[in-house]
Image (tube, rainbow, N blue to C red):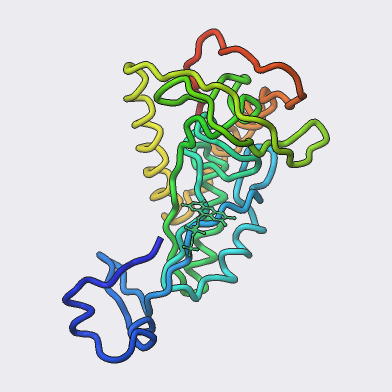
Amino acid sequence: MSVSARPEAAAAAEGTPEELLFQPYRLGPYDLPHRIVMAPLTRSRARQPGNVPGPLNACYYVQRASAALIISEATQVSMQGQGYAWTPGIHSREQVEGWRLVTEAVHRAGGRIFNQLWHVGRISHPCLQPDYMLPVAPSAIKPSGMAFIENENGEGELVPFVTPRALQIEEMPYLVRQYFRGARNAMRGLRRRRDPRRQRLSAGAVHRFRHQSARRPVWRSGPEPGAAADGSGRDGD
Ligand SMILES: Cc1cc2nc3c(=O)[nH]c(=O)nc-3n(C[C@H](O)[C@H](O)[C@H](O)COP(=O)(O)O)c2cc1C
């Protein structure tokens, strides 16, 4: 993503394009010191289990905090929304705490960071989905290409995509809610640390999430799996 200068701002700015690049820019409520924006880059480095951002991610973003604005790597709004191994989510309490670690470190280094939310639809695989369900899509059409998954040895592996399950119209509000929850969690992640009583609660949520992620099966090569019975793709937290 890049932030293009508004025409009036560009007209007001003086100098060559290179000089313009280093002039400040007002982006909504944010004062950017220059106009170089870091594009979102999937890194597949979230801590396991649970796809939780941690110190490695904080270090990566702090090293890039001199960008006027960082757009984070794409971040799934639900387990159903994950499409690549080890990408971070923003749907569990533990993930929100992880993002708080990242954003606080970036802010301390003088940077600004926005979270890019995603739900990958059919660009996924049952072994990335809760309870080995099929990925969902507008239509049951198999994408060409390969999915990046974690194999039984804990290594990254490319495997063919499967035919997704077509979403029902009635499911759409649930998808919208996943994004709503992701956006709300991203904003919570920027707030101050909660009081100790709330942090004790979050330890319970961490346990619950670990238990949940333990249900995710390991991928073994074989025939294309069928749709899960309930097909809802719901996940908690
Ligand atoms: C390794 C890699 C990971 C990427 N991850 C994301 C991502 O998470 N979200 C996204 O919107 N774009 C992603 N992109 C696309 C980049 O943000 C960027 O748009 C693309 O590399 C084209 O940039 P360019 O026109 O400056 O070459 C990724 C690209 C690469 C090479």
Image side of residue 157 versus residue 97, left or right: right
| Residue under the point 54% across and 56% down | 41
| Residue under the point 42% across and 68% down | 69
Is residue 198 at least partly visible in the picture? no
Q: Nearer the viewer, residue 43 or 29?
A: 43
Image spot of residue 11 (x, y percent): 19, 82
Residue 189 in the image: above or below residue 210: below
How many numbered marks, from 0 up? Answer: 0
Furthest residue toward left? 8
Residue 198 in the image: above or below residue 113: above
Residue 5 in the image: above or below residue 137: below
| Residue under the point 50% across and 34% down | 81
| Residue under the point 44% across and 62% down | 113
Q: Nearer the viewer, residue 61 or 99?
A: 61
Furthest residue toward right? 153
Image side of residue 82 versus residue 151, left or right: left
Residue 162 in the image: above or below residue 8: above
Furthest residue toward bottom? 15
Image side of residue 97 versus residue 17, left or right: right
Asked which quadrant contains residue 166, the reply is top left
Image spot of residue 79 (x, y percent): 54, 31
